[in-house]
Image (tube, rainbow, N blue to C red):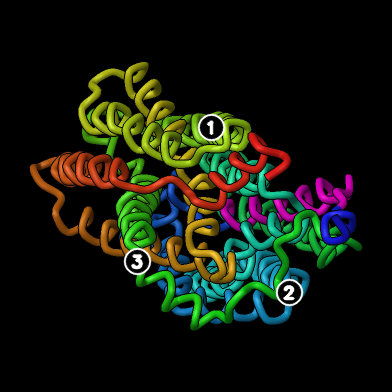
Amino acid sequence: MAETATVRLYGYRWVVLGGFALLNAVVQLNWITFAPVTGDAAAFYGVGELEIGLLSIVFMAVFVVVSIPASYVIDTYGIRIGIGIGAVLTGVFGLARGLYADAYTPVLISQIGLAVGQPFVMNAITKTGARWFPLTERATAAALPSLAQFVGIIVAMAATPYLVSSSGMTGMLMVYGILSVVGAVVALALIRERPPTPPSVTDDEQRVRVFEGLRRIFRQRDMLILLLLFFVGLGMFNAISTWIEQIVAPRGFGPQQAGIIGALMVVGGIFGAGILPVISDRRRRRKPFLLLAVSGMAPGLIGLAFAPSYPLLLLSSFVFGFFMMSAYPLGFQYSAEISYPAPESTSQGIIVMAGQISGILFILGMDAFRSGPSDSMTGSMVVFIVLTALIIALTARLQESPMILGTLEKAADPGG
């Protein structure tokens, strides 16, 4: 009783989560900025479409290199220092990209700086939840910054073509530079390390260090399955988001339609990330909702590959986004629970890193294997459909989170 008496929840946890969510939105906006205007950006900078794709790819490449060091900083020095580093890099290089927007090289350098900041923000999602939220709210706590990432993506997908047409490439990047500074300042002002008393009886003293946690992660069958799930799922999302204009162009759809298709995919993700993780917390189950998420994205993926009409493409995009994006926060929290006592930012960082590696491979592969006179990417989409069938089968073999089951058993038997 003495141990549980110190446990208390604070309303300020939602303020911390709000500031952190805003920063996550800005980070993703900066990543996907050029995807809906690939052709226009290539013409503006006098480079090929692959060089514009590189502006997105660098985020994935840098993540692979910086992810583990970022997780080490977050786990060793705390979320305020870790997220603070990400916030400063986001504000500085977001503004630099706007100030030097008229030349490709400084824009690429700014993208690299923004990319270095990304893992300091993204890898702190489950750690922030563990610092401020009880176990039965942590999928929800992971869902809100994940949902904010999707908001950042949808703003970029929907607004970038219109900002370019009204203010030009330099005007668009300056607008996003100002947003980057605002997001960084708000996060730095609001985020605190931890509440005065912990939200649960599970504390940091029970955690192992980063590299011991990595060894534990790679010895677990369910974590290896989850790594493959993120390798395929997040890699597909990164690749489809990057090449959305080129995927639909052979069917006669232009940049603004491609931007709306991409934006609707993320709108679906907002609904999915806002619904399934919350139900998962309330039902105190992880596996059924992960399986539902990976199974449900298959019809949407098929529609994105083959739908001939614009309304059907929009519906397919929404369905794919709804289920694909809901797996994102669910997977984060499931990984933190099954890999315990590995640090949360380590388990999260390693599965996101898997998706970044595959994103690079998938983006380059889709560009290399275009086929036909219209440079169709349908063949690559068929490969994605086959890979989705594989991860559905593997997800069915996952075990339920023992941590969430323990919570359920405790709730069912208060005297136990």
Q: Secondary structure at mark 1?
A: helix
Q: Report if the CB atoms under discs 2 and 1 are less than 8 Å apart.
A: no
Q: Residue furthest front?
A: 415
Q: Left or right of 69: which side holds 75?
A: right
Question: 160 or 209, which is in the foreground?
Answer: 209
Q: Residues within 10 Å of mark 1 (few under 14, many from 20)?
A: many
Q: Residues within 10 Å of mark 2 (few under 14, many from 20)?
A: many
Residue 282's x, y, as percent? 62, 32
> Could you tell me if residue 376 is visible in this image?
no
* Amino acid type indicated by mark 1: Leu
Residue 159's x, y, as percent? 58, 39
Residue 145's x, y, as percent? 65, 48
* Amino acid type indicated by mark 2: Gly
The magenta segment: 8-29
Residue ID for mark 3: 357
Q: Left or right of 110: which side holds 223?
A: left
Q: Is 205 rendered above or below residue 278?
A: below
Residue ID for mark 2: 78
Residue 17 part of the magenta-drawn span = yes
The secondary structure making up most of the magenta span is: helix
Disc with the residue nearer the chain's start (2 vs 1): 2
* Residue appearing at x 39%, y 21% in the figure: 315
Q: Report if the CB atoms under discs 2 and 3 are less than 8 Å apart.
A: no
> Could you tell me if residue 24 is visible in this image?
yes
Residue ID for mark 1: 276
Between tags 1 and 3, which lies in front?
Answer: 1
Q: Is 184 rendered above or below residue 328?
A: below
Question: What's the distance in space between the residues labelled 2 and 1, CA to CA?
Answer: 29 Å
Disc with the residue nearer the chain's start (1 vs 3): 1
